[in-house]
Amino acid sequence: MRAFLPDMMEKNKGHIVNITSIAGSFATANLTDYCASKFGATGFSQSLTLELREMGKTGIKVTCVQPYTVNTGLVWYPKAR
């Protein structure tokens, strides 16, 4: 973000894509670390969207992709019970 966002803001053009997990919107037992990291990335996407809108930077889009779970190595074999 630090490298690309300033140029995007200057041009009012660009697209930021963050891949998190549905665990970033709904907490799950036994996946505390995983959920916490995904909540952070999801909140970042939502906050950035609002800040860009308030600054009138409507040409910069933010997408937050939330698949079910992603095996990132943070939690071994994430799965629902």
Image (cartoon, rainbow, N blue to C red):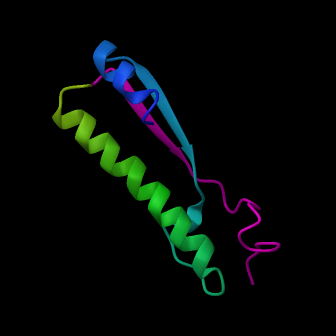
Q: Is residue 8 left or right of residue 52?
A: right
27 left or right of 6 in image? right
Q: Is residue 46 above or below residue 59?
A: below
Vertical side of 8 occupied by 70: above or below: below
At 57% across and 62% down in the image, what residue appears? 22
Residue 5 occupies quadrant: top left
Nearest to the observer: residue 58 or residue 11: 11
Q: Residue at x 66, y 86 (%)?
A: 30
Q: x, y (%) of residue 67?
A: 65, 54
Which residue shows up at 77% across the image and 62% down it?
71
Q: Which residues are magenta?
A: 58-81
Query: If the image is split into quadrants, where does the N terminus sit?
Result: top left
| The stretch drawn in magenta includes residue 70 | yes
What percent of the width, then of the height, locates residue 24?
52, 64
Q: Is residue 29 magenta?
A: no
Image position of 62 (left or right of 79)? left
Q: Quadrant of the C terminus?
A: bottom right
Q: In percent of the image, x 72 and y 59: which residue is there?
A: 70
